[in-house]
Image (spheres, rainbow, N blue to C red):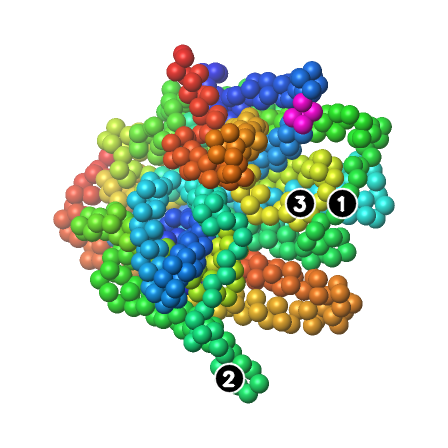
Amino acid sequence: MLFLIAAGLTLVLGIMDFVFLAHGSQVMIGAYAATALTAWTGNFYLGVALAIPLTFVFGLLLETLIIRHLYHRDHMEQVLASFGLILFFNELVRIGFGPAALFSNLPPMLSGAVTIFPDAPYPVFRLVVIGVGLLAAVMIWLLVTRTRLGALVRAGASNRTMAAALGVNIALLQRFVFAIGACLAGIAGMMLGPITTVESGMGEPLLILSLVVIIIGGVGSVQGAFIAAIMVGLVDTTGRVLLPHLLRSVMDQATADGAGPALASMLVYIFMSVVLVVRPRGLFPPKG
Amino acid sequence: MAVLELQGLEKSFGALVATSAVDLTVEPGEIHALIGPNGAGKTTLISQIYGSLAPDRGRILLKGEDITRLAAHQRVRKGIGRSFQITTVLMDFTAADNAAVAVIARQDNAFGMIRPAASDDGLREAAMAVLARVGLAKRGPIKASDLSHGERRLLELGLALAAQPGLLLLDEPMAGTGPEETARMAEIIASLKGEAAILLIEHDMDAVFRLADRITVMVEGAVIATGTPAEISANAAVQEAYLGDLSLEESSSGEDGS
Amino acid sequence: MPGVFLTAIRDGVKQHRLLWLLLGLLGLFPIVTSVADLPFWNDVAMRIMILGMAAMGLNLILGFGGLVSFGHAAFIGLGAYAVGISQFHGIDSGWLHTLIALGLTGVLGLVIGFLSLRTSGLYFIMITLAFAQMLYFFFVSLEGYGGDDGMILDRAEFAPFDLYEPLRLYYLIWVSLALVSLMLMMVIQSRFGLVLQATRSNAGRVEAMGLNPLRFRITGFVLSAMIGGLAGVMFANWQEYASPAIMHWSRSGELLIIIVIGGMGTLAGPLLGAIGFLLLEEFLPEIIGHIAPQYAENWMIIFGPMLVLLVLFVRGGLMGLITSRFRGGG
């Protein structure tokens, strides 16, 4: 899950060297699009199938209208412009869909549980999410390392002018990469919708978490993002499970239950700071 | 005592040996040129002396003191000045402001937060003296980004000189400058003889053979010869490895005057 | 050429008269509000001064030091909690609160600065955000001090002043802002200020001059953290409330917005930006309310695109506009 968002973001952020914080908005828009289209068509699969190209088109539009004017600006301005976009999209969905959270219902086939281990039923949909995450990982890896497009993207990343001199249409390439990033975020949003709630601003906590993933993995490294996503997921989950138990042994239960989740949230950031203090450019900085 | 002494300096990047057991001394007041084909490890060597790269093995002595483990800015305080291969000045500062920062750095009171720096006449005069030293006295109010490339090289040299270093590391100070500025640069470098020892990387062989007291030739990370310009021109290993017969004759002809 | 010496410094404080003018206006503002009988606007002015103060502090490292810190709200929060937690344990003196806040933000600024400044660029933005998030969740986890809900508190005792008397708090904030302005003016014009700006321009050259850029950056970082702490003390007294929400990451973003609206790397810019930002926050909902009342709450939908347009088309923020106007007029 985290990887989906992080992968899309690392494409934009690392490979295109563009600090884009409105990625969370794209997650949110993916979730809303899927939910609305599911309601409209009455079919979850159809809704998702329609929503995916929609997020892609959305990414294309955003790039053409605003983002491409910002490539040559400094980080600070990129941060602010995308912050402005976050505010805009949050309000937009609040106006369009109302302030209340939406719930999206899963078709029966996906909402059941399977029993993998005895006494531990596992929701089918979570398996689907994991499956989609892995699929996306494999596809991005293939795309980047095995196709002509991937080679172009990598060329564009390491040297824009050079790639331009080779006759590569950089503007088009960047638009395409950005749209793929938007699409990945959108898919993440669609997967996320049924697990949590669909509401305005839902993407932001994830955005920060996926930025953490990218930073730990090393900006611009898809493989780094993949490994870091797993690590962050592990740190987060073990923190959430183990910390309350640990705390309960040193303080009374009420305090421990209150402090546990918050401390667990801290753990991810502590993890990242430690990584950065030891390796200021992340675990897998891209070569060169 | 030698100003600079390198003892068995080694540095590798993975399988690539950039510096292989280099011994080298720079004597007081001499201009010591470091030449060799591209990729011979000249800049890597200078970076280790300056402190931006740590050697894997070996020692660096500055006037007899071991500075191998000091950070770059600490070495500068001990008397090393450097100009970089890619011009490194404060681009959005004027020439005079560049000089003022260099003067502040030398004066040991850079953390002063009370007195306004602009009304400090002593600072201004010292900054102007730094500019005058490299012939840029009239260019004070010009932003560094608006200076010509050659003027920026001169400014950088002036900034390095402001700290009154005992050893100057100059990495291709004449690369890309116009003929007039090249001449001025050579003149200034020559005028430093006796004031500071200089380790000079330069591809302009005319300038090297005219200016240098001694020349060290590096090939693939190793020193293959050190000697006076005459000795180097006559060295068979150098001829074979680097200079080639034709260019050698051209270069040594420029040496007649000295 | 004495007139042009140290232009790097002069550019930064070029519009310092504007700052004193703004401060003067803010000092006289309560007279206007009492004549016009609009006490609510005193509240807005106090918020402007508090956020302006924090933004001016952040601008020291952002505008003059070139370091984009995305976690500055944490220091405001620390300042606010210094008041809240001290009061919880029976310390009521506001002077003492201020001292504690400055000490706390100073020490934490030193630690965070030391660790963060090993990185640069995007990594620096993210690691400062990470530290801010850590502190945010840390205070959320402190159930004893209100946890997520924060803690309600009384205005502190700044003897001999009673902050519950009318306008005492207003002028306490105003004086703090004036002191911060004076201090920043002094620091920016000093040798330290010049070297700090030199590290922004090219840290490699500063190092080659024999100075350690890290020490200047850390000093700047600590100073700006402490100013944030002072703003936090004022914030807690103004709001009579301290909660983790003060240090939410979106507030760090807000501070960046304020600085960019006003003009980065100028002394008066952040205060101007705070005025612009908070006036927009007050007036945009009203304006929208007149046109389409049902959307008055959603003022951000206008503000967001305004921000994007500002970044795209106006360089140097409001200060840039003012400066180019002056230039245009000769």
Dot 1 crowding, Cα within 10 Å, few <14, some 14–19, many 20+: some
A122 over C220 or under it: above or below: below
Q: Residue at x 41, y 30 (%)?
A: C314
Q: Secondary structure at mark 2?
A: strand
Q: Chain of mark 2?
A: A
Which sits in the foreground, B178 or C202?
A: C202
B34 over C11 or under it: above or below: below
Q: Which amino acid does the dot numbered 1 rest on? A: Ile
Q: Chain of mark 1?
A: C
Calculate the distance from the C-alpha at mark 2 to the C-alpha at mark 3.
47 Å
Report the disc number at residue C46: none
Q: Which amino acid does the dot numbered 3 rest on? A: Gly
Quadrant of the image occupied by residue B172 = top left
Quadrant of the image occupied by residue C324 = top left
Residue C287: in sight, yes or no? yes
The span picked out in magenta is C38-42
Task: Identify the residue position indicated by label 1 in the image.
Answer: C152
Q: Residue at x 53, y 24 (%)?
A: C13
Task: Identify the residue position indicated by label 2 in the image.
Answer: A115
Report the disc number at residue C77: 3
